[in-house]
Amino acid sequence: MTSNFGKNRFSVEPMIAISMKNIKPWSVGVFARYNLVEQDYFTLRVGVNPSVNFQVENYIQDGKEVELIQSRRYFGAEIAPLFTVMKKWRVGFYYLRANGFDEGPKNGHFFGFNTSISRVRLSRYFYFSMVPQIFHLRIDDSEGYYASARLSLHFSDSAFSLASTLNHSLKTELGPDYDLTWNLSLIYRMD
């Protein structure tokens, strides 16, 4: 669950992620972002992201296995240049550097190339947006290459939309090598 609060060039985006499988927390964080440059054809956004992620650990206590949710603190910084090619087409890069303070991963690097095609009218009642991305993720000494896409179907004259994010690992040393992961979101926009 994310929200976006902002004024002028500054925005704050609190985020909470939980598992729908067992309703356990995944992460809590806040992105504070500032558009350093805002022009018709170019935007440069910088930001910081203090966050906590949660890991389920099993321990033996008094001869019984006990499940404990352990928190890990992180601090990240991001930079995201974005170029407008045409009114509905933009291309950009995104780099996020994260440092861990507790037991677990200490150094994270995320670098992605993305493009966005927005508000393509499908009919009088619907329009479509998509954000395909190729990215590299490095956590400590392990890395992976991935492709992803965020697809959105918007309803004209409605605050509701549907979205899905699809991720595919191209080559990875990180965790399970899933062919495809995806989600489905119902979004309500408050203007």
Image (cartoon, rainbow, N blue to C red):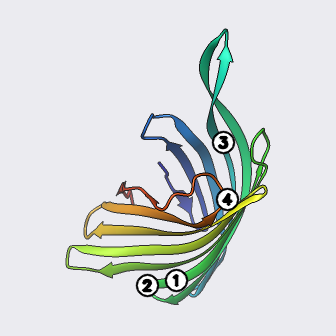
Label 4: state its secondary structure.
loop
Callout 3 amino acid: Val
In the picture, residue 96 is in which quadrant? bottom right
Q: Give the label, 4 or 2, closer to the camera.
A: 4
Report the side of 160 relative to 71 (left or right). Answer: left
Mark 4 or 3 closer to N-term? 3
Report the side of 46 relative to 88 (left or right). Answer: right
Say which residue appears at 46% left-offset and 61% top-offset. 180
In the picture of the structure, the residue carrying the numbered disc 2 is 88
Image spot of residue 101 (x, y percent): 79, 43
- The answer, for residue 191, to whether it is visible in the render is yes
- Residue 173 — which label? 4
Mark 4 or 1 closer to N-term? 1
User: Are circles 2 and 3 on residues that touch, CB within 8 Å?
Assistant: no
Image spot of residue 34 (x, y percent): 66, 65
In the picture, residue 170 is in which quadrant? bottom right
Callout 2 amino acid: Lys
Mark 2 or 3 closer to N-term? 3
Image spot of residue 104 (x, y percent): 75, 42
Nearest to the observer: residue 121 or residue 156: 121
In the picture of the structure, the residue carrying the numbered disc 3 is 52
Label 3: state its secondary structure.
strand
Callout 1 amino acid: Arg
In the picture of the structure, the residue carrying the numbered disc 1 is 90
Say which residue appears at 37% left-offset and 58% top-offset. 189
Q: CA distance from mark 4 to mark 1?
A: 31 Å
